[in-house]
Image: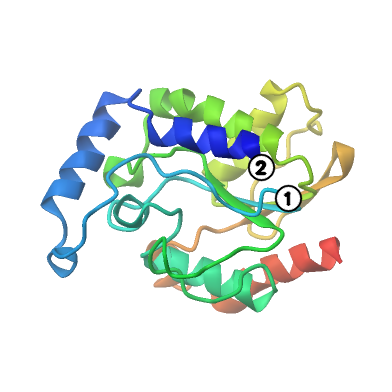
């Protein structure tokens, strides 16, 4: 618990990427019309959840008017609506809605992180920005000592989780697992990796990802943990 608390303070204080610092602060100053009354977070977004979690959910990066506004990962946007509804359905969250940092939401046996901690322009971090944030991902993975199921939201998170394992010196199967929705990979040391399409509007509005498809990922996670 202490290690994650220290890590999250380091994340919030980070100013390593000039492009991301400029973008996140500019968005926080300009705001969207419907959020004019909000004081935007406008900083890197730390991880959130249960330090003793056995389920680790890894996303890409905060949304400009979601996590960058609220200060909590997957909070205040439609991707978060999908994620927390699914977590609540399968017993990992005490409520289905995630609106702001003081809304009473608590996670049980689940922790959520991101490969990049600042909102990127166009939701597309650059390679050097992934690299700058890598140390946070590595420390987070190491600090979550009880994790035995990892759900990655999108191909980028899937690939970066496997890269992180390699950098940590943890064994990765060969050939390296390939991403697909509901790919289930048994990794060494008792960890199961499950891939999921990201619950972005691009995927949910087009029907590429449906509620039953998304629910099935967390149903599988709960089945493994049970």
User: In the drawing, does residue 140 fall left or right of residue 189?
Assistant: left
Q: CA distance from mark 2 to mark 1?
A: 8 Å
Q: Quadrant of residue 220?
A: bottom right
Q: Which mark is residue 1?
A: 2
User: Could you say whether the residue bearing mark 2 is in a helix, strand or loop?
Assistant: loop
Where residue 91 appears, as percent x and y from the top left, is: 69, 73
Mark 2 or 1, nearer chain start: 2
Reply above or below: 152 against 87.
above
Numbered circle sitting on residue 124: none
Report which residue position mark 1 lands on: 52
Q: Residue at x 45, y 65 (%)?
A: 80
Q: Compared to 215, does 160 lie above or below?
A: above
Asked if the residues shown at circle 2 and circle 1 are in contact, with their CB atoms under 8 angstroms apart, the answer is yes
In the foreground, 126 or 77: 77
Most distant residue in the front direction: 2
Looking at the image, residue 127 sits to the left or right of residue 175; the answer is left
Please tell me how crowded label 1 is: few (under 14), some (14-19), or many (20+) other residues with Cα within 10 Å: some
Image vertical order of residue 159 relative to residue 223, above or below: above
Residue at 67% from the left image edge and 48% from the top image edge: 51
Pick the front one: 100 or 209: 100
The secondary element bearing badge 1 is classed as: loop
Q: As drawn, is 150 to the left or to the right of 224?
A: left
Can you tell which quarter of the image residue 70 is in?
bottom left
Q: Does the image show residue 116?
A: yes
**Screen quadrant of the N terminus:** top right
Residue at 65%, 54% (x, y): give it.
Answer: 50
Quarter of the picture containing the C terminus is: bottom right
Q: Nearer the viewer, mark 2 or mark 1?
A: 2
Q: Residue at x 37, y 36 (%)?
A: 125
Q: Position of residue 177 (x, y in %)?
A: 73, 41
């Amino acid at each position: 618990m202490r290690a994650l608390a220290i890590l999250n303070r380091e994340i919030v204080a980070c100013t390593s990427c000039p492009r991301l610092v400029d973008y996140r602060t500019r968005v926080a100053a300009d705001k969207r019309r419907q959020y004019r009354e909000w004081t935007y977070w406008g900083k890197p977004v730390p991880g959130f959840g249960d330090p003793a979690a056995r389920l680790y959910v890894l996303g890409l990066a905060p949304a400009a008017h979601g996590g960058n506004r609220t200060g909590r990962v997957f909070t205040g946007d439609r991707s978060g609506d999908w994620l927390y509804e699914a977590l609540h359905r399968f017993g990992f969250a005490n409520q289905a809605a995630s609106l702001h940092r003081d809304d009473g939401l608590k996670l049980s046996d689940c922790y959520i992180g991101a490969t990049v901690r600042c909102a990127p322009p166009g939701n597309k971090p650059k390679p050097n920005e992934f690299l700058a944030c890598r140390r946070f991902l590595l420390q987070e993975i190491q600090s979550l000592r009880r994790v035995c199921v990892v759900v990655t939201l999108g191909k980028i998170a899937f690939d970066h989780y496997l890269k992180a394992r390699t950098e940590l010196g943890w064994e990765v199967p060969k050939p390296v697992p390939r991403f697909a929705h509901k790919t289930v990979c048994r990794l060494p040391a008792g960890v199961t990796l499950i891939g999921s399409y990201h619950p972005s509007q691009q995927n949910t509005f087009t029907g590429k990802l449906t509620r039953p498809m998304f629910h099935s990922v967390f149903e599988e996670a709960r089945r493994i943990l049970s």
